[in-house]
Image (tube, rainbow, N blue to C red):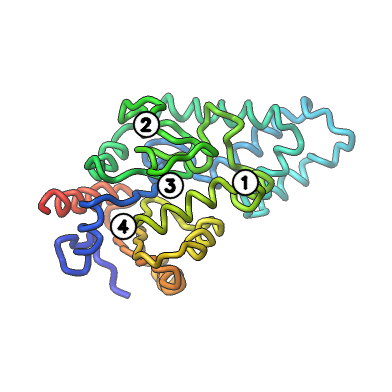
Amino acid sequence: MCTPEIPDFNSAEYEELIDNLSSGACVFFGAGVSKLAGYKLWDELEKEMIKRFWERRKELRLINPDQFDHSLMRSLIDLNDEIESLTYLYNLNNFIFAEEIKAIFHEDQNKAANKPYDYLNRLNNGKNFFVTTNIDVGFQKYLGINDINVAIAPNFSNPPKIINYLHGRVDKQNTWVFTGTQYHDNYHGKNPYCMDIIRSIFEDYTVIFIGYGLRDKEILTGIRLSNKKRKHYWLESSSRHKEDYLKVRSTNLREVNINLIPYLIDNYGDELLYIVLDGMYNALAAK
């Protein structure tokens, strides 16, 4: 496929998207946005947590040392499954787990930049709302809104708030969704709060994913369980080595009415997202 550097949001191809953003849609943003602000990606957070647990291994007070020896530490790094790794660390010592998660996000927040949130906020026309799997408070702090205008798992509302923290927020430990059990309870348990809100949103609104890899199977399950078949969009960077992957991924996502909007970053890098969002905003402002 031939990917343009910047999508032409004034073209007929994106008329339906701009119409939906004009009347009210869901902007679902993920770690790719927070990464530009200075926070860690999911795999970076996992590796940092493994490193910090290793540094504090004497505090774990393990019955069997091989529960977290050097060999096991390396195996966790090589596992390539963030949920499995974080679940293991949580089960080793949930107190240290919570301490280090808070410390990492606090350190990142202290050096975070607002530029990504400035561009994301250009889609905030008073009708659109935002959903995120991120637990940082960067966007909320940028908007300067209090907790009355946000919803944090498991306490969602209908209609949704301006910002909806699907996997919890860093300052509210009991809301976090990191481990296998937490994913199960929030999506498949007796009170599947996250699954319920995902189904509701995808039934009632067009969703555009920004900076989100769509790797959470639970999100796709929620779309499949929704009653209405709305058209949704996935804004995703492309590059020379990524085009075959996107060809396969976008073909499969069409089964759940998610349409890929690619933009080519080879000449500009990840910050091309700012120009892409500005183009989307300009098309929206012209409505």
Any part of residue 108 in sight: yes
Q: Which of the two residues, 273 or 75, is positioned nearer the viewer here?
A: 273
Left or right of 179 in this view: 273:
left
The residue that mark 3 highlights is 30
Dot 1 falls on a residue whose secondary structure is loop
Q: Earlier in the sequence, mark 2 or mark 3?
A: 3
Q: Residue at x 85, y 41 (%)?
A: 66
Tell which tag, 3 or 4, sits nearer the viewer.
3
Q: Of the residues shown, which amino acid type is indicated by label 2? A: Asn
Pointer 1 with pointer 4, Cβ within 8 A: no
Measured from the top left, where is residue 67 in percent x and y? 82, 41
Residue neighbourhood size for the residue with mark 3, other residues' Cα within 10 Å, grouped as few (<14), some (14–19), many (≥20): many
The answer to whether mark 2 and mark 3 are in CB contact below 8 A is no
Tag 3–tag 4 contact (CB < 8 Å)? no
Q: Which residue has dot 1 on it?
A: 191
Separation of disc 2 and disc 1 at Cα? 23 Å
Q: Amino acid at mark 4?
A: Ile
Q: Which residue is mark 2?
A: 149
Q: Secondary structure at mark 2?
A: helix
Q: Nearer the viewer, mark 2 or mark 3?
A: 2
Picture disc at residue 265:
4
Separation of residues labelled 3 and 4 (CA atoms): 18 Å
Q: Residues within 10 Å of mark 4 (few under 14, many from 20)?
A: many
Which is nearer the N-term, disc 1 or disc 4?
A: 1
Instruction: Please report the residue visible at 20 percent of the width from the left and 52 percent of the height from the top.
Output: 22
Q: Position of residue 190 (x, y in %)?
A: 66, 48
**Would residue 20 be found to the left or right of residue 95 on screen?**
left
Which residue lies at the image location 41% right of the left edge and 52% below the top edge?
Answer: 201
Mark 2 or mark 4: which is in front?
2
